[in-house]
Amino acid sequence: MFRNLYNRFFPTPRFLMAPSFGLDISDESLKFVELVPAKSGIRIGRYGERKIPVGIIESGKIKDPKRLEQVLLSLKKDEGLRFVRVSLPEEQVYLFRLHLDKVGLVNVREGIELSLEEHVPIPAQDAIFDYELLSEDEQGLELQVAAIPKNIIENYLSVFRNSMLSVQSFELEAQAISRAVIKKGDMETYMIVDFGQTRTGIFIISHGIAVFTSTLDLGGAMLTQMIAKNFNVGLEEAEKMKRKFGLERNMANKEIFSVLLNSASVLRDEIVKHFLYWHTHKDEKDRNHPPIKKIILCGGDANLTGLPEYFSISIKNKVETANVWINIINTEKYIPEITFNRSLTFAAALGLALGDFEHE
């Protein structure tokens, strides 16, 4: 969704285009990945991460455009970026399902616009939206709609334009991550948990489309802080302890396990809440939602030892750590430069970069 929003108004001639960088922007950091075609498939080009100073972006809203432009200009100079595919902040996007009757329907977008204010707290003239077709019959269309305040998009466009970067697409972070971690063509329903440093995204993907997103203000930093507090150590040492022991229950890490369990249980409760809601509530047509086949973990703190097992036992559903290379590289034949643990933090950027390899 929101693909080619920029190029709709400022198209780039195809022969001038180079491979795009997937650019995953959050309040704290900017992650970038380039994917390049090779004889044997797709290979990793340039990649990396830059910290974004506190106060430049808050909850996905750009608060200091000039300083963000400086970060992007520096990145452009150092890495040679020209074309980028960018993730949109989940906190600012509204998702909803909409049924449009075919009777009297002339234009789908006009039909959505007329219904927009019934579903989102944004006046239609102040919103930008896009949609995916879920199903169609003789009576009408079933759509998944995403809407975002126009000023959010305009602020991002202005920053990239001033940084002399050409935006090939804007896309929901959830949709980008799903492209990286769900096998292409898989139409089953999955829950993705993006467990980051300061926040966690919970997404439900069905038939390849993001149908639900939620962002929680908790992340791996909370676990690190709890260890630091309970064992009276610095944050750096606490992070090492978290990585070393994780959620494995044994005599050596009995005390750390107890501290981490208390924090991890907060996230577990949120996952359970969304999981149960999905399975116990019906959709707009009074139909049961398709069951969630499994829960996929990604993000920088998803590789915490024992975390998938803990969630799996608690939620009573299959939980596994993501394979972000599933649609990119056969890791049995080629080992990418990015380590497995670090690759989990690049799920969104990799999914964005994969947009270059989709047939439009």
Image (spheres, rainbow, N blue to C red):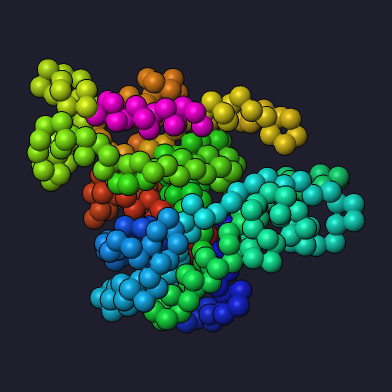
Residue 283 place in picture, x, y as percent: 68, 34
Residue 34 place in picture, x, y as percent: 35, 65
Left or right relative to 92: residue 217: left
- Can residue 322 be seen in the rendering of this structure? no
Residue lying at 59% horizontally and 43% vertically, measured from the top left: 211
Q: Nearer the viewer, residue 357 or 213?
A: 213
Residue lying at 40% horizontally and 73% vertically, measured from the top left: 65
Q: Nearer the viewer, residue 235 or 329?
A: 235
- Can residue 98 be seen in the rendering of this structure? yes
Residue 33 place in picture, x, y as percent: 34, 62
Residue 24 place in picture, x, y as percent: 39, 59
Residue lying at 48% horizontally and 36% vertically, measured from the top left: 191
Q: Quadrant of the N terminus?
A: bottom right
- When asked about the image quadrant of residue 26, the answer is bottom left
Q: Main secondary structure of the magenta part?
A: helix
Q: Is residue 311 inside the magenta stretch?
A: no
**Residue stretch rendered in magenta on the structure:** 260-274
Residue lying at 35% horizontally and 36% vertically, measured from the top left: 321
- When asked about the image quadrant of residue 127, the answer is bottom right
- When asked about the image quadrant of residue 258, the answer is top left
Q: Quadrant of the C terminus?
A: bottom right
